[in-house]
Image: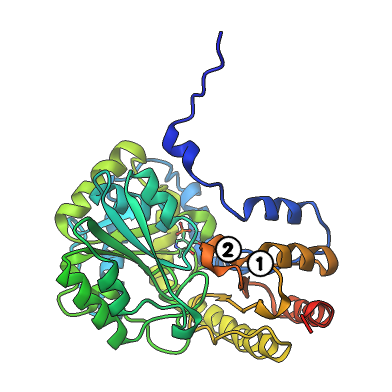
Amino acid sequence: MKNRNFVAGKVEKLAPSGIRAFFDLVLGMKDVISLGVGEPDFITPWNIRETGIFAIEQGYTSYTSNKGLYKLRLLIQRFLKQRFELKYCPDEEMLITVGVSEGLDLAVRAIINPGEQVIVPLPSYVSYGPIVELAAGVPVYLATSEKNNFKITAHDLDAACNRKTKAIILNYPSNPTGSTYSLKELEDINKICKKHNIIVISDEVYGELSYEQEHISFPSLREAKKNTIYLNGFSKAYAMTGWRMGYVCGPKPIIAAMTKIHQYTILCAPIISQMAACEALQNGKRSVEEMKREYKRRCDFMFESLNAIGLACAKPQGAFYIFPSIKKYGLKSLEFAKLLLKEHKVAVVPGVAFGKGYDDYVRMSYATNYTQLKEAIKRMTVFMGKYVKK
Ligand SMILES: Cc1ncc(COP(=O)(O)O)c(C=O)c1O
């Protein structure tokens, strides 16, 4: 019998994640300081873990409503109202998802017809492009540069829009650069989105980790709500990556469409995680503030230290990433990362993983404890001395 290729064309066509092979190398090595991971080094605060344990003990092991526990949706409603003056109806404008990841996938699948375009600013979180491609949409990459702190401008966005543009995926504070937008910048972007009548899929998973300014939620801008799909979750701020908890808020018809896909593919998010998320929203604020303070301390340290050893970078304004330039080394980002790993056992993510034009950068995560960050800087100082182009 002839060997048949059972893999669907659109999946086969997807480029594998540029960093997987690199992190396979890391797994095989001892004594590596990893600045590569995109998740908090903290474990979930105890009161949240305990709530999860107690939920199991009490026998909460069933499905929930497709939309998620009503209590959790009410708590999210309260949080968004208090935090951003945002009003969402927990019945019709909200859906509990399996992480922001599921929310992103549902948002794109719910609105994109084959061939429609989604603008993805670069450098970007690695999933955006593939999610659009899997939904038979076309990602249109919009490059940004260090000059503008890796942010899109209203002018560039205007130029990138055409009749086929359906949406833009915004993410701020940003993975991988840590940059965020001011009110004026967001308002200008909003104007262009309105001009072209496109949807903003706003990934604000790092919204609670904003250091330099109060985070401004996109749907809270004037007249933005009806064109925005707002995504948030518990992974980053509450150190709950493994619980897989997220939520999405948006216009009623879009949430209804997303819920349709969700009910056939996922049914509901895990009840135990939903109960833990309720505890996070009720009694987690102090823990978030403590973790944020520590990230900020590390951010200041990394910013000062990297610039001092010649790895020039802008000050991150949020999230837990820093994106220094490696131009001076004269090496491609993957070569740089491999060499740094081999010679000094420090793992960083090559910039090229976040977009083709970012081979002169690497992403470092400071969701790593302070002592290890200090040791990483020590090792990089030696490395820098050896390889910098004279
Ligand atoms: C920008 C961004 N969006 C979404 C996610 C996924 O988050 P979740 O764990 O909620 O699925 C990540 C994880 O790294 C991220 O960096």
- Tell me where residue 232 sits by quadrant: bottom left
In the rendered view, how is the structure colored? rainbow
The one of 76 and 351 positioned closer to us in this rendering: 351
Secondary element at tag 1: helix
Whether residue 69 appears in this view of the structure is: no
Q: Residue 111's spot in the image, x, y percent?
A: 23, 51
In this picture, is 282 found above or below 127? below
Question: Residue 352, which numbered label?
Answer: 2
Q: Residue furthest top?
A: 1
Q: Residues within 10 Å of mark 1 (few under 14, many from 20)?
A: many
Q: Is residue 226 left or right of residue 165?
A: left
Residues at marks 1 and 2 touching, judged by CB atoms closer than 8 Å: yes
In this picture, is 63 found above or below 212? above
- How far separated are the C-alphas under marks 1 and 2? 7 Å
Q: Residue 110's spot in the image, x, y percent?
A: 25, 48
The amino acid marked with disc number 1 is Ser
According to the image, label 1 marks what residue? 333
The amino acid marked with disc number 2 is Val
In this picture, is 220 found above or below 166? below
Q: Residue 175's spot in the image, x, y percent?
A: 49, 69
- Tell me where residue 170 sits by quadrant: bottom left
Residue at x 79%, y 83% (from the top left corner): 381
